[in-house]
Every structure is written in structure tokens, then in C-alpha cells.
Image (spheres, coloured by chain):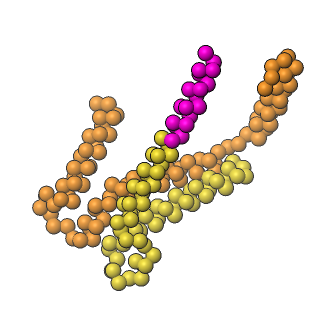
Amino acid sequence: MATGTDQVVGLSLVALSLIIFTYYTVWVILLPFIDSEHIIHKYFLPRAYAIAIPLAAGLLLLLFMGLFITYMMLKNRGLTKKAQ
Amino acid sequence: MTKLAQWLWGLALLGSAWAALNVGALGLELPAPCRDVLWPLPAYLLVAAGCYALGTVGYRVATFHDCEDAARELQNQIQEARADLSRRGLRF
């Protein structure tokens, strides 16, 4: 078994993914079948956010990936020039 | 047929089925809660796939078998190699 911080990080990732999955499943799949008078609707944002938040998160992810790749490419271009 | 072609076919079929059901082209009158579940379905599947990937990565990180002895031995060998090379004049 992995030790120390590896286990903590791994298990917290599992917990995070389960939390996100359950919340999102209840939000998208279960809420439309629950009476709009029920108190559980108080804990969930308007359903338009169910598309907007993952979309924004996905775009942010793509942005960071692009920035990271640009940064690595710029760093390596300087290196090859010096080697020549 | 290549794997890419298979995936694209599958996605095209599912996507057109979803679009047809949403627009009402098949003439089915779906009850309102079902339509409310249907239209975010692609986003839901993407998020679910992302959660599965994240959870699997986390689980594999947590259950990876460490080899403490091999790690220590490797570190010792690295130290030896550094000492040896710096003795021969290579600067780090």
C-alpha cells in the first residue's frame, strides 16, 4: 500500500469525485422528479448552472493546459538554441 | 473500421437520437420531468466520466505498492554516482 501523503491525496481525490458525482446526479437526474414544493430544492442552484458551471470549468481547464504547453515550448526553444 | 470511426459513429448516433428526442421530431410527447432530464444529459455524462476518471486516479494513487527498500537503495546509488562524478570533475 502507498504511504503517508500518497494515501491522503488518493483518498481525498476519491472522496471529492464521489461528492461531485452524487451532487450532480441529484441535481440533474433526481430533482425534476421531485415536487417543486419540497425543501430539498433550497440546496440546489437553478438548473441552468448545471450546464454553465461544467462548461466554464472545462474551458478553464483547456486554458490552463494551453498556457502550460505554451510555457513549456517557450522554455525548451531557448534551450535548443543554446545547445546549437 | 478503425476505433476512431467506431467512436465517431457511436457519438453521431447517440447525438442524433438525443437531438431528435429534444426537438420532438419523433412525435413522442415526453412528460415534462423526462424532458428536463434529457436536455442536460450530454453534460451529465461528461461530468460523470470526469468523476470516474478522477476517482480511479485517486484510488490507484492510494493503493499503489511502494517499495521502500528499493527506493532507499536507489537513493544511495544516486548519492554514490554524484560523489563519483564530482570527484572526476563533473560539476552539477
Looking at the picture, how far across and down is residue B74, in whole percent? Answer: 77, 32
For this view, does B75 lie left or right of residue B44? right
**Residue visible at 18% across and 59% down?**
B23
Chain ID, orange in image: B
Q: Going by the image, does A42 lie left or right of B39? A: right
User: In the rendering, at what x and y percent does residue A9 appear?
Assistant: 64, 53
Left or right: where B66 falls relative to B58: right
Tell me where the magenta segment starts and ends, as one range. Answer: A67-84
Q: Is residue B87 above or below residue B72?
A: above
Task: Please name the residue shown 53% across and 31% down the image.
Answer: A73
Can residue A24 be seen in this snapshot? yes
Q: Quadrant of residue B30?
A: bottom left
Residue B81 at least partly seen: no
**Residue A83 occupies quadrant:** top right
Camera-nearest residue between B48 and A46? A46
Give the total of numbered labels: 0
The reply, left or right, for residue B47 in relation to residue A9 is left
Q: Is residue A46 above or below residue A18?
A: below
Q: Residue at x 76, y 37 (%)?
A: B71
Prevailing secondary structure class for the magenta stretch in the rendered image: helix
Residue in the foreground of this view, choosing between B2 and A16: A16
Q: Which chain does yellow denote in the image?
A: A
Residue drawn at point x = 53 percent, y = 53 percent:
B55
Q: Where does residue B59 sit, x and y in percent of width and height?
A: 58, 51
Magenta span contains residue A75: yes
B72 drawn magenta: no
Against B64, is A56 above or below?
A: below
Question: Please, which residue is most extreme toward the right here?
Answer: B87
Which quadrant, please, contains the C terminus of chain A? top right
* Occupied quadrant, residue A8: bottom right
